[in-house]
Amino acid sequence: MHQSCSTEKNESLGPYRKAEIRAATRADTEAVEQCAFETYSRYNDRFGKPAPHLVELASAIDCGNVTVLTLGETLIGYVVYYPRADHMHLENVGVLPRFNGRGYGRRLIEHVEQAAIRDGLDAVELYTNEKMVENIAMYPKLGYTEVDRRIDNGYSRVFFRKTLNRGAENTQRG
């Protein structure tokens, strides 16, 4: 059994507490796997084992495709993403359930958007299972537009895309 990655004592300070985003290392593998398990287990009764359970996280970490969010020594969230030809693909994002609703998932998604801009990409694309209705309601609030619904790798998925305003980002930096 994995050791829990949810041992943070003072959780009530919310997203303004000094959470840090950094690249995942091989040493984070077990905590990321546990975080994924805790994040997605709530969906098992809807459609069995969700696709994020099937992602080979150790390989994704080795490829540099995983970023983690920590509070002190506690890993509370992660995101898997990588560039494709014309966009950044957000494969998987998870936050420990006890930290939901505090802006941490949004912060991880914004990190992916910034990475896309740094890489010269104009969009972020992602998908979610059609039975994850919470996600389908949330992504448009973050500026994502539904672009497709189809069966993909045996799952009924809803696809989203967000076009990024690189010009505004460059203006803010300069």
Image (cartoon, rainbow, N blue to C red):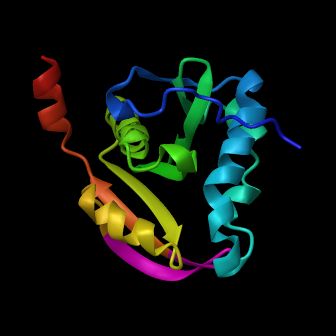
Q: What stretch is highlighted in magenta?
A: 146-157
Q: Where is residue 117 shown, x and y percent of the image?
A: 31, 35
Answer with left or right where residue 174 lies relative to residue 123: left
Report the magenta stretch's main SS: strand
- Examine the structure image and report whether residue 153 is included in the region drawn in magenta: yes
Q: Give the residue at x 67% y 49%.
A: 36
Within the image, what quadrant is residue 160 found in? bottom left
Answer with left or right where residue 135 lies relative to residue 36: left
| Residue 149 visible (yes or no) | yes
Q: Give the residue at x 83% y 40%.
A: 2
Q: Give the residue at x 40% y 20%.
A: 18
Q: Is 22 drawn above or below residue 138 in the view shown? A: above
Answer with left or right where residue 113 lies relative to residue 91: left
Quadrant housing the C terminus? top left
Q: Where is residue 60 shown, x and y percent of the image?
A: 69, 39
- Examine the structure image and report whether residue 34 is included in the region drawn in magenta: no
Q: Where is residue 65 shown, x and y percent of the image?
A: 60, 36
